[in-house]
Image: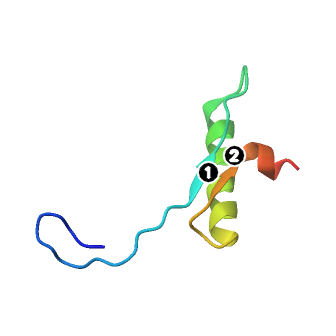
């Protein structure tokens, strides 16, 4: 992959993502903590993945 503006080669870009669904009456810190746990799980599973809080609760 290269930068469009300069043509400099920057290598491969990957993405690890955590997705947590808001639960009714939930406080923001609890939602953020679940989303962060999802990101950590995605990275531990090999990166370049998406993990949801539904997957974590299984």
Q: Position of residue 52 (x, y in %)?
A: 70, 47
Asked if 4 appears above or below 12 in the picture, the reply is above
Circles 2 and 1, Cβ within 8 Å, touching? The answer is yes
Q: Tell me which residue sits at (41%, 69%) in the image.
A: 13
- Element marked by disc 2: helix
Q: Residue furthest right?
A: 58
Residue at x 69%, y 46% (from the top left corner):
34
Residue drawn at point x = 57 percent, y = 54 percent: 17
Residue 29 position by quadrant: top right
Which x, y percent locates residue 51? 68, 53
Within 10 Å of disc 2 (Cα), the crowding (few <14, some 14-19, many 20+) is some
Instruction: Classify mark 1: helix, strand or loop.
Output: strand
Residue 10 relative to residue 49: left or right: left
Which residue is denoted by mark 1 in the rendering?
Answer: 18
Horizontal relation, residue 20 to residue 57: left or right: left
Q: How many marks?
A: 2
Q: Nearer the viewer, residue 43 or 1?
A: 1
Q: Residue drawn at (11%, 71%), measured in percent from left and top? A: 6
- CA gap between label 2 and label 1 equals 8 Å
Foreground: disc 2 or disc 1? 1
- Which residue is more in the foreground, 57 or 1? 1
Residue 37 in which image quadrant = bottom right
Q: Residues within 10 Å of mark 1 (few under 14, many from 20)?
A: many
Q: Which mark is residue 34?
A: 2
**Colour logic:** rainbow
Above or below 11: residue 29: above
Which is more toward the observer, 48 or 39?
48
The mark nearer the N terminus, 2 or 1, is 1
Which of the labelled discs sits on residue 58, or is there none?
none
The residue at the far top in this view is: 25
Q: Please provide percent x and percent y for residue 30.
A: 69, 38
> Residue 21, position in %: x, y?
67, 34
């Amino acid at each position: 992959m290269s930068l469009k503006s300069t043509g400099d080669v920057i290598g491969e870009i990957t993405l690890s993502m955590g997705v947590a669904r808001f639960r009714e009456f939930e406080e923001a810190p609890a939602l953020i903590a679940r989303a962060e746990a999802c990101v950590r799980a995605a990275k531990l599973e090999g990166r370049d993945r998406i993990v949801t809080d539904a997957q974590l609760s299984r």
